[in-house]
Image (tube, rainbow, N blue to C red):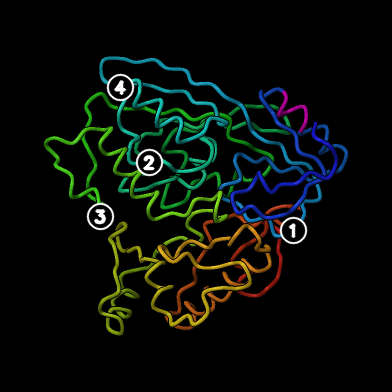
Amino acid sequence: MIKNRVSLKSLNTFSLRVYADYVIKVYTEGDLLIFWNRFVQKGYSVLILGRGSNVLFLEDYCGVILLNRIKGIDLHEDKYYWYLHVCSGELWHELVVYSLKNNMPGLENLALIPGCVGAAPIQNIGAYGVELQKFCEYVDILNLDIGEKIRFTVDECQFGYRYSIFMEQFKFNYVIVAVGLKLSKTWRPVLNYIGLDKLNINSVTPVGIFNAVCIMRQYKLPDPLVFGNAGSFFKNPVINCALMDDLLNDYPDMPCFFYKQNLVKLSAGWLIENCNLSVSTCGYASIYKKQSLILININQQATAGEIVTLAGRIYEKVMDYFHISLEPEVRFIADFGEIDSVQLLSTGKKVLRK
C-alpha cells in the first residue's frame, strides 16, 4: 500500500494535481477481490483505474484507487484463427506490438491507443476504420461483491459507436479482467480512412499500416508528457437522417458519415471549429491547435476547473449554433466517484452516475 494522501498526477494523462486517500497496485484477481471488499466494508469509495488515459479528476478523490496491473497473454490457434486471452492490465499498444512481432496481423490500425486492454471494450475503442468489436470474441468480467466471473460473448457486449453494455448495466461493482480476441489468418488490410487510403493495397504490409498509423497519431495528437490530455474529449454525435437533412440546408459543407440504418455520424471537431468559439483557452487549459477535439493542459499547470470551464463553453456554443449536445468521451471523476458529464456541462450540477 502506498502512503496516505497520494498524488495522482502521474496516474492520469491530464497530469492534474489531485490526490486520493490510498492507491494500491493490484496484480491478481484474488488481490483485487480482497482489497475491494476490505475497503468497501470499511465505507470507502473505491475506484478501479488502469492507466488514467480517459479520466478527468475534478477534485481530490475521497477514497481508494486500485490500479489494475493484472497481466498475462495466453495464445492458441487453429487452421483459421489465432485466439488470444489477454488480461485486463496489459497495455493496449504493447498488445498490438506483441501481435505483429509474432506475425499475427489485424490490430495494426489500433496502434498507439493509450490505456489498458480492460478499458478497450467499455467504449469499443476504434481508430482508422477499425473497432475492437471486429476482433473481440468475449469479455470476462468479475462481480466484486461475490467473486463470480461472467463471460460475455461479442454479441452480448452490445457494441456500438463508443459504447458497450459495460458502460451502463455493469458499471459498478464489476470489473473487466480479461478480453478474448480472435485474429483471422486470412489478413485483409483496412485502408478506407483518410491517410491510409494513399497506401498501395497490393503491396502494403501490416507493419506498414502500423507505422503509418503511428506517424499520423504522433503528428495529430499531443504528447501527454508535454501537454496533459485524454485524447478526444468529445464523442462524434450520432443523429437521424431527417435532422441531418435540416442541418445540410443551413450548412451544406457539414461533413457526415453513414453510421447504420437511419443514422449518421457528425464530426465533433468540425462542429467545434465552426461554432464561432471566440475563446479557445481558459487559464492553462486550451483547445489543441492541431485537433479541436482535444483539450490540453498547458505546461501541466491547468486545474480541473479550467478544463471543465473550457469544455462547458464548447458544449454551450455547439448547442447554441447547431442544437446538438456534445457528449464527453472522457469520464468525469468527482470526490466520491464518477458523475454525469453532460449534466455538469449543461447545468453545472454534479450528479453521481448510478
Amino acid bearing label 4: Asn
Q: Is residue 34 magenta?
A: yes
Q: Residue at x 45, y 79 (%)?
A: 323
> Dot 1 corresponds to which residue?
59
> Dot 3 corresponds to which residue?
194
**Image coords of residue 60 (percent x, y):** 77, 54
Q: Is residue 228 above or below residue 96?
A: below
> Dot 2 corresponds to which residue?
110
Q: Earlier in the sequence, mark 2 or mark 4?
A: 4
Q: Secondary structure at mark 4?
A: loop
Decide: few, some or many residues near mark 3? Use Cα within 10 Å; few <14, some 14-19, many ≥20.
few
Q: Secondary structure at mark 3?
A: loop
Q: Earlier in the sequence, mark 1 or mark 2?
A: 1
Question: Magenta stretch?
Answer: 31-35
Between the C-alphas of marks 3 and 4, the distance is 26 Å
Between the C-alphas of marks 1 and 2, the distance is 32 Å
